[in-house]
Image: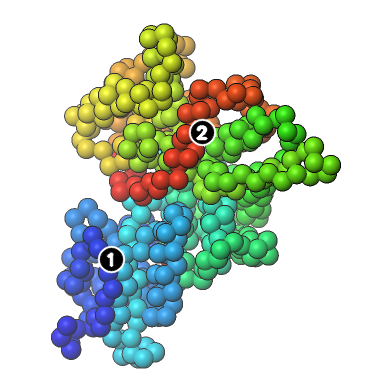
Amino acid sequence: MTSSHGLTALHLRQGHPDFLDLPWHLPLGDWNPKVCSRLVEVPRGLSRHTVVFVSYGTDIYALKELPVPVGQREYDVLRGLEDRRLPAVTAVGFARMRVPGEPKDETGVLLTQYLPSSLPYRVLFMNKGLERYRERLLDAMASLLVRLHLGGFYWGDCSLSNVLFRRDAGELQAYAVDAETSELHAKLSDGQRNLDLMIMEENVTGGLADLAAMVELPHTLDVYETARSIRQRYERLWSETHKEISISARESYRIHERIRALNELGFSVSEVDLVASGDGSQLRMRTIVTDREYHRHQLHNLTGLVAEERQAALILNEIREVKATLTRELNRSVPLSVAAFRWMDDRFRPTMSQLERELGPAIDEAELYCQVLEHKWFLSERAKKDVGLKVAVKGYVALRREQPALALLRSASAPLPTVVTEASVSTEAAMDTPSEEAEDEEADTAASQVPVPVPSGGGAR
Ligand SMILES: Nc1ncnc2c1ncn2[C@@H]1O[C@H](COP(=O)(O)OP(=O)(O)O)[C@@H](O)[C@H]1O
Ligand SMILES: [Mg+2]
C-alpha cells in the first residue's frame, strides 16, 4: 500500500472482492459517482454514521464508517451472530483508514453484505403496494427479538431503522442490522431482556413520532400503541416457548404434542427436560427451543431449497398434499422425502422453468413460487374449485405483465400461521403411538439442526 493511500489495513473474509479499487484516500462522506463508479443507491433506514453502498456485479455491500474499536467490536458481534445462526446482516470485513484529525488519525470501515431484497420500514410505510405488510411488521419485530434473545443476543439499540425486513410469502422476516451496542451472552437474564424491550419501545415510539411529522401514518400504526403491541406479541411468543407443562407418566403423547405445537410455530426444539414433581406421579416438562427456522430446515433437508420460514411452511404443505395424493394412488404409505422429490419434478421445476421463459430469471425462487400459490388460492376461491397450478401460472404471468411490481391479491382462504395452543393440536398428534406423519416430523426435528445457508437471492422481481 503506498503512503498516499488512505487504507492502512484491510481484514476480509474469503469469497468477496478485495475492494482495493475503492477511493480509500477519501472519507466515505466524500465518495460520489465521479470518484467511485461502484456507488449505488438503495432504500435505507436512518443512520448516525456515514453508510455507502457499492456494487460488484450483482453483489452489493454496505460500508459504514465508524471509530476503529467500535467497528471492530461490531464486526466480532456480527460474526458471533452468524455462528449462532441468528438473523442479521453478514459481516464481510473491516478496514482501517488514515484520516488526519480522527483519534490516532484513523477511522474504521465495517463492510457487510447487503441483505438482498431487504426493505427498510420507511419503504413499507410509504410504498402503496406494501400496505398489507404493515401489520406484519409488528409480528416480524417481535419474532426477531424472541429469536435473538433465545440466542443470547442483547441488542441495546433495537429500533425501526436497525431492522431490515424481507418478504416471506405474505409475511415478513426481520433481520438485525447495526450491532454496535450489542453483546453476546450464553443466556440472557430477564433483566437484560426487559432492558432491551424498554429500549425498543423508546426507539420505536421516537421513530414513529418522527415519521408521523413527515407523512400520515396508517391507522394500524399508532405512534404510542405500536411499540406496546410489539412488546405484547414478544411476551406472548416468549411465554409460549418457555411454557412448562405438567404431565403424568401415562401421557407421553403430550410430549410429542408440545413439540409439534412449537414446530408449527416454526421453533426447533433441541432438548426436552422431564423432572418428577410432587409425589412423583407427575412430571414437569420443559422444552429448550433453539431457533425459529423449523420449516426452513425441514424444506432444505428434503429438497435443498433455501427459503424463508413461512415460504417453507407453505411449500411443505404442498409437499404433504403430494404425499397424500401419492398414498391414495399407490394405495400404500409414501415417505415425505419421496413426495418432496415428486413435488420438485412435477410442480416446482416446471413452474420455475415456465416463469423464467415468460418473465426472465427469478431472483428469489421460493418467494416467486409462493406468490403463484397465493394466486392459485385466489383464483380457486373465485372459481369455487381448485383451478390447478397450470391455470395459476398463466394467470400470474398475465398479472405480472400488467403490474411488474405486483401488489398481490390476497385470498381470504390463504392459510395463515396461527398460534397453536395445546387444545387445538390435532387428534392425530394426540395418539399414544405417533402417526407416520409425526414420525416424519420427528425425524426432521433431529435433522433440523443442520444449518441452512442464508438466501443469496432477493425477493420477487
Ligand atoms: N448490510 C446491509 N444490508 C442492507 N441495508 C443495510 C446494511 N447495512 C446498513 N444498511 C442500511 O443502512 C442503514 C444504516 O446502517 P446502520 O448500521 O444502522 O448505521 P448506524 O450505526 O449509523 O445507525 C440501516 O438502517 C439500513 O437501512
Ligand atoms: Mg442504525
Residue 73 visible to an observer of this rendering: yes
Where is residue 74? Give x, y as percent: 43, 70
Q: In this rendered view, identify the residue nearer to me: 1 or 379.
A: 1
Ligand 1 has an atom within 8 Å of the beta carbon of the residue at disc 1 = no
Q: Is residue 101 left or right of residue 151?
A: left
Q: Is residue 45 left or right of residue 236?
A: left
Q: Amino acid at mark 2?
A: Glu
How many numbered marks, from 0 up? 2
Q: Amino acid at mark 1?
A: Arg
Q: Residues within 10 Å of mark 2 (few under 14, many from 20)?
A: some
Labels 2 and 1: the sequence-earlier one:
1
**Alpha carbon separation for disc pair 2 and 1:** 37 Å
Q: In this rendered view, identify the residue nearer to me: 258 or 237.
A: 258
Placement of 196 over or under 349, stated as above or below: below
Residue 407 visible to an observer of this rendering: no
Where is residue 314? Give x, y as percent: 44, 30
The quarter of the picture where residue 57 lies is bottom left
Q: Residues within 10 Å of mark 1 (few under 14, many from 20)?
A: few
The quarter of the picture where residue 347 lies is top left
Q: In this rendered view, identify the residue nearer to me: 425 or 1.
A: 425
Question: Which residue, given by chain and number where applicable, does mark 1 sit on?
Answer: 13
Colour scheme employed for the rendering of this structure: rainbow
Q: Is residue 262 left or right of residue 40?
A: right
Badge 2 marks a residue whose secondary structure is helix
| Quadrant of image for the C terminus | top left
Q: In this rendered view, identify the residue nearer to me: 241 or 276.
A: 276
Badge 1 marks a residue whose secondary structure is loop
The quarter of the picture where residue 67 lies is bottom left
Question: Which residue, given by chain and number where applicable, does mark 2 sit on?
Answer: 442
